[in-house]
């Protein structure tokens, strides 16, 4: 997901089609509500589940989002033993766990297998949902890439019909995919988790406006004003205290169902304060 932050500087607006409102179940969409923390495969935190849960408890976090692998990983699940422990410890603390996978869309069967592996990281302790990180541009044909992204999430829905599924997407305000399958994704996913990252350093007002626009635009292009949206802002370490606070207020005022910063490793005291601002309503 760090890759998106760099690509935003070359972003162009999408021409996604409006979609009819799909029948995603509200209970599934609610899995992605509240505040969250993000851990990727490069983070030392992936190997210290006890520390992650302790931080999440201390900060009143609702959901832990943890990356299981990406398209270039040599295995289907990186750090499987700590991730299994994370699910158990988090659930004991009343915290939800949502694994996420970054597909490349070059090898659909590999992407499917790795999503299935992500669903199973908890063993007998089932995860609460799953998120598909739709950002990679390895497939250069925009139409084919969009088709494969939509097909992958549709496969996930067909394979796990009762699962809570989220689509992690680039910001619709700074979209760099010429074609993005909003309509198809809305049919299969229960919630959208847009990466509402600024393309450059912004003032607090600009950050607020951009975050509001991220949520508003996403609901416009999906044709669903009630769309469950969890805003991912960031990168946490690159935002000022005023910028962090502005992002939280923007997400809150736009009616986002959830809010978080990418990522846990770069979130400091001012980031936690901003999460508290969002939670306070």
Image (cartoon, rainbow, N blue to C red):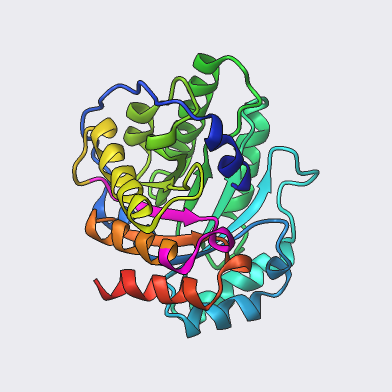
In the image, residue 231 sits, relative to residue 92, either above or below, namely above
Which quarter of the rendering shows the C terminus? Answer: bottom left
Q: Quadrant of residue 12?
A: top left
Q: Residue furthest right?
A: 74
256 sits left or right of 201 in the view = left
The picture places residue 219, in percent across and down from the top left corner, at 25, 39
Is 238 left, or right, of 162 in this rendering? right
Asked if residue 7 shows in the view, the reply is: yes
Residue sitting at x 63%, y 42%: 3
Residue plotted at (28% across, 37% down) = 217
Q: Nearer the viewer, residue 235 or 135?
A: 235
Query: In the displayed structure, does residue 160 sit left or right of residue 210?
Result: right
Give the residue at x 30% y 63%. 249
Q: Is residue 231 above or below residue 93?
A: above
Q: Position of residue 206 (x, y in %)?
A: 35, 50
Query: Depth check: 79 or 145 in front?
Result: 145
Looking at the rendering, which quadrant does residue 175 occupy? top left
Along the line of sight, which residue is nearer the eye, 114 or 70? 70
Residue 4 rendering spot, x and y as whole percentages: 57, 41
* Residue drawn at 38 percent across, 67 percent down: 245
How many numbered badges does the structure rendering display? Answer: 0
Q: Is residue 188 one of those drawn in magenta?
A: no
Q: Which residues are magenta?
A: 227-242
Residue 131 vs residue 217, the one in the foreground: 217
* Quadrant of the image occupied by residue 188: top left
Whether residue 235 appears in magenta in the rendering, the answer is: yes
Q: Position of residue 151 (x, y in %)?
A: 48, 26
Residue 100 sits above or below residue 279 on the image: above
């Amino acid at each position: 997901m760090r890759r998106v932050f760099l690509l935003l500087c070359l972003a162009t607006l999408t021409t996604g089609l409006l979609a009819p409102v799909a029948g995603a179940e509200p209970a599934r969409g609610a899995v992605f509500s509240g505040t969250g923390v993000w851990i990727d495969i490069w983070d030392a935190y992936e190997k210290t589940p006890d520390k992650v849960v302790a931080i999440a408890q201390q900060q009143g976090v609702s959901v832990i989002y943890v990356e299981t692998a990406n398209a270039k990983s040599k295995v289907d699940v990186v750090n499987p033993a700590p991730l299994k422990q994370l699910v158990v410890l988090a659930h004991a603390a009343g915290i939800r766990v949502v694994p996420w996978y970054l597909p490349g869309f070059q090898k659909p069967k590999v992407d499917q297998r790795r999503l299935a592996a992500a669903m199973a990281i908890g063993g007998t302790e089932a995860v609460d949902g799953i998120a598909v990180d739709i950002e990679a541009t390895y497939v250069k044909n925009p139409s084919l890439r969009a088709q494969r992204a939509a097909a992958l999430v549709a496969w996930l829905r067909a394979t796990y019909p009762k699962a809570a599924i989220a689509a992690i997407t680039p910001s619709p305000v700074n979209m760099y995919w010429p074609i993005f399958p909003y309509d198809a994704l809305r049919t299969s996913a229960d919630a959208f988790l847009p990466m509402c990252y600024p393309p450059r350093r912004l003032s607090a007002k600009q950050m607020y406006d951009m975050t509001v626009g991220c949520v508003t635009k996403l609901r416009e292009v999906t044709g669903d004003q009630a769309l469950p949206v969890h805003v991912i802002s960031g990168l946490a370490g690159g935002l000022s205290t005023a910028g962090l606070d502005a992002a939280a207020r923007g997400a809150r005022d736009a009616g986002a169902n959830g809010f978080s910063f990418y990522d846990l490793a770069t979130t400091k005291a001012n980031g936690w304060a901003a999460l508290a601002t969002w939670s306070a309503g």
